[in-house]
């Protein structure tokens, strides 16, 4: 598909959503309950109404999936259906097409302003896994708390490390979270029960599983992308002081399960195709089941902005998805190599995506080097970790040859701890 293709729907300059994007999400408006939708520019397109008008007749009775409260049933139709729906949307909304333009009343019902819809959770997440695939983040954390000369654990360059997270507290952008409370210990001996003082964000992206595998079956790196529906932004809120006290011997628990935020639009791998790049060289060579061919990483710019109450927002991080050491094909292959079955809608997050320079670190833990180097907001105002009423906004977009494919925003406000 040509980067120069345009839509008859207006797309403002710098928009994340040109015709070539066509992400999928779930909306609620004054006109209808939860339904599937896509977006071009600032226009939201109701896919349920399009289905009623026969635009997706090739799906037969399955066209009803666009009336569901989540995208799970649509995703379960498989890659051939995703691609056919995408190709139909490209044809209908391309400049010069009048299939929809000529139906004035229908256009009024199907085309909505982004300002008049509420974005909902795009998928029902059954299971969630958080990887640790950002090698710069792993090096920073290892240098900070262990030995800078041996920052990485011995297994890091051999397998994509991960832990199973909590899916029930994953929420869509715009959801606010209370500061968590749990045990912390300043001396790693005597605990106290209190609200976290070291609340942090983690800049991540996640992929949505689009095709299941049975128990006992594994998904190869060559097959992996057929099992992935698309990607979204992921903010894994983390309470560092709670984490330090609880993580030995089984890893994070209360420090991670109180809230994570995703962007509302799922961007397909088809839309990201022009931005494929090679990932970091993996040394030593990985085991055969983790080997792959082709370009499996993506050149996606990532930003984090933090706005304290009463102060202008400040961009605190500029990173790139290409900093990941382990790619999505390897993540899924490793997740299933033991026969673990994945289900439609499962989320696999990348882990914190940090770059090699301080300004590209994907968490406040790294940006302030565990509170030693505060972020300066001017007029004596600083940030070490997140404070009450801080607003965290994450953005992701890929740009090349005049084409920009973006994810929108992933936003949350930190509320005070509950009494």
Image (tube, grey):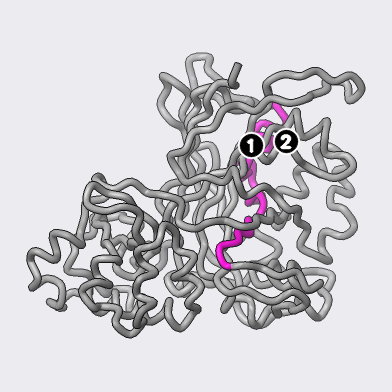
Q: Secondary structure at mark 2?
A: loop
Q: Is residue 96 above or below residue 304?
A: below
Residue 64 inside the magenta-drawn segment: no
- Image quadrant holding the C terminus, namely top right
**Residue, x 52% and y 62% (percent of image)?**
231
Residues packed near mark 1 inside 10 Å, few (<14), some (14 to 19) or many (20 plus): many
Residue 262: percent from the left, percent from the top? Answer: 51, 49
The image quadrant where one finds the N terminus is bottom left
Kindly indicate whether the residue at mark 2 contacts the one at mark 1 (C-beta within 8 angstroms). Answer: yes
- Residue range of the region highlighted in magenta in the rendering: 344-372
Quadrant of the rendered image containing residue 104: bottom left
- Left or right: where does residue 280 sit relative to residue 387? right
| Residue in the image at 57% along x and 56% along y | 125
Residue name at image x 71 percent, y 80 percent = 220
Per the image, the residue denoted by label 1 is 258
Please determine whether, in this image, residue 295 is positioned above or below residue 393.
below
Q: Main secondary structure of the magenta part?
A: loop
Distance between mark 1 and mark 2 Cα atoms: 7 Å
- Asked if one can make out residue 100 in the rendered structure from this viewpoint, the answer is yes
Q: Is residue 368 magenta?
A: yes
| Residue where numbered disc 2 is placed | 254
Q: Is residue 406 visible?
A: no
Foreground pick, 187 / 121: 121
Q: Quadrant of residue 112?
A: bottom left
Front position in the image: 313 or 346: 346
Q: Which mark is residue 180?
A: none
* Residue at the image point whose x is 63% and y is 56% from the top: 349
Residue 10 picture location, percent across and down: 19, 60
């Amino acid at each position: 598909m040509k980067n120069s293709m345009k839509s008859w729907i207006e797309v403002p300059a710098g928009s994340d959503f040109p015709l070539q994007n066509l992400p999928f999400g779930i909306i609620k408006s004054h006109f209808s309950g939860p339904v599937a939708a896509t977006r071009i520019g600032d226009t939201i397109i109701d896919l349920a109404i399009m289905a009623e008008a026969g635009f997706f007749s090739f799906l037969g009775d399955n066209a009803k999936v666009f009336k569901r409260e989540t995208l799970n049933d649509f995703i379960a139709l498989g890659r051939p259906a995703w691609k056919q729906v995408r190709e139909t949307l490209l044809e209908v909304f391309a400049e010069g097409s009048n299939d929809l333009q000529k139906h004035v009343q229908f256009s009024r019902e199907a085309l909505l302003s982004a300002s008049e819809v509420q974005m909902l959770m795009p998928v029902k997440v059954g299971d969630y896994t958080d990887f640790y695939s950002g090698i710069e983040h792993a090096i920073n954390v290892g240098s900070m708390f262990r030995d800078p000369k041996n920052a990485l654990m011995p297994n890091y360059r051999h397998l994509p490390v991960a832990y199973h997270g909590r899916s029930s507290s994953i929420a869509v952008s715009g959801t606010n979270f209370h500061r968590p409370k749990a045990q912390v210990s300043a001396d790693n001996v005597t605990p106290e029960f209190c609200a976290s003082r070291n609340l942090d964000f983690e800049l991540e992206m996640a992929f949505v599983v689009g095709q299941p595998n049975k128990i006992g079956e594994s998904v190869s790196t060559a097959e992996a992308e057929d099992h992935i529906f698309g990607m979204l932004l992921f903010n894994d809120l983390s309470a560092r002081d709670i984490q330090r006290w609880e993580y030995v011997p089984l890893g994070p628990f209360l420090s991670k399960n109180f809230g994570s935020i995703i962007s509302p639009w799922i961007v397909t791998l088809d839309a990201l195709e022009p931005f494929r790049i090679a990932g970091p060289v993996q040394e030593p060579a990985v085991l055969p089941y983790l080997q792959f061919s082709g370009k499996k990483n993506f050149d996606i710019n990532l930003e984090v902005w933090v706005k304290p109450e009463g102060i202008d927002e400040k961009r605190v991080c500029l990173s790139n998805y290409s900093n990941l050491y382990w790619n999505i094909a390897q993540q899924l292959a490793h997740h299933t190599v033991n026969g673990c079955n994945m289900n439609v809608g499962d989320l696999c997050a990348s882990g914190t995506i940090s770059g090699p320079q301080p300004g590209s670190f994907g968490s406040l833990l790294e940006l302030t080097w565990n509170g030693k180097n505060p972020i300066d907001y001017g007029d004596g105002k600083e940030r070490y970790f997140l404070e009450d009423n801080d607003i965290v906004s994450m953005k992701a977009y890929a740009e090349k040859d005049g084409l920009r494919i973006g994810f929108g925003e992933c936003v949350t406000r930190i509320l005070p701890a509950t009494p």
